Image (cartoon, rainbow, N blue to C red):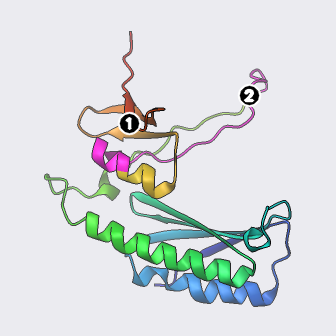
Amino acid sequence: MVVKVDLFAKNMDITDRINDYVDKKVSKLDHFMSGVEETRVDLAYEKAARSASDRQVAQITVRAKGVILRTEERADDIFEAIDAALDKMQRKMERFKGKRHHGRGDGTSVAELTIEPAEVEESDALPTIARRKSFRLVPMDELEALQQMSLLGHENFFVFYNVDTDVINVLYRRRDGTYGLLVPEVG
């Protein structure tokens, strides 16, 4: 199966050469992990970077069944940044596959447990909300949430549906480097 690749650019033009290069390289990611649903590649030129070797940025986000993996690399050449991000993504996919050898215990797959997000309506009555974002919650336990938080590169918090308690939880990093868990109660 060929992976669908969405390519986006910021502060740079996407030439046919770059487009063909990204399609050719990124479409092979399904060899490293099955179930890849979509792949997003963000390329950027950051002229305000301190070093010239950090100006070209390639970020790759892969959405597969029940998981999102993201890598970002910087280089002085966009093709080097793309290659480095792809290498990092391939290692991340292999590592993730290795961690997923254990099952949930009841035989259900992550895809079957996926909860669709509720529709959110935009309203002019709330001027302080600058952006609304909806996302798919995947049931997981606390250990899986810690792993997913590190795989995504989220450093401050991670929202997940706790399969053990059937409640939405927020995992966050504390100042001392440990983690905290917010468990809401309706009262």
Residue that badge 2 annotates: 123
- Magenta highlight on residue 133: yes
Tell me the tag on residue 137. Answer: none
Task: Give the amino acid type for the residue marked by disc 2 in the picture.
Answer: Ser
Task: Give the amino acid type for the residue marked by disc 1 in the picture.
Answer: Thr
State the image coordinates of residue 23 (x, y, percent, origin top left).
63, 85
State the image coordinates of residue 71 (x, y, percent, origin top left).
55, 66
- Magenta highlight on residue 51: no
Residue that badge 1 annotates: 178
Q: Nearer the viewer, residue 64 or 182?
A: 182
Residue at the farthest top position = 187
State the image coordinates of residue 148 (x, y, percent, origin top left).
40, 53
State the image coordinates of residue 169 (x, y, percent, origin top left).
39, 32
Q: Tell me the quarter of the image containing the N terminus.
A: bottom left
Range of the magenta residues?
A: 124-146
Q: Tell me the quarter of the image containing the C terminus.
A: top left
Q: Residue at x 52, y 39 (%)?
A: 156
What whole-number distance in Å separates the C-alpha atoms at marks 1 and 2? 38 Å
Q: Residue at x 79, y 26 (%)?
A: 124
Label 2 Cα crowd, 10 Å radius (few <14 / some 14-19 / many 20+): few
Q: Residue at x 34, y 70 (%)?
A: 95
Label 1 Cα crowd, 10 Å radius (few <14 / some 14-19 / many 20+): few
Quadrant of the image occupied by residue 110: bottom left
Tell me, yes or no, whether the two marked residues, 1 and 2, touch with CB atoms within 8 Å.
no
Q: Is residue 102 left or right of residue 55?
A: left
- The overriding secondary structure of the stretch rendered in magenta is loop
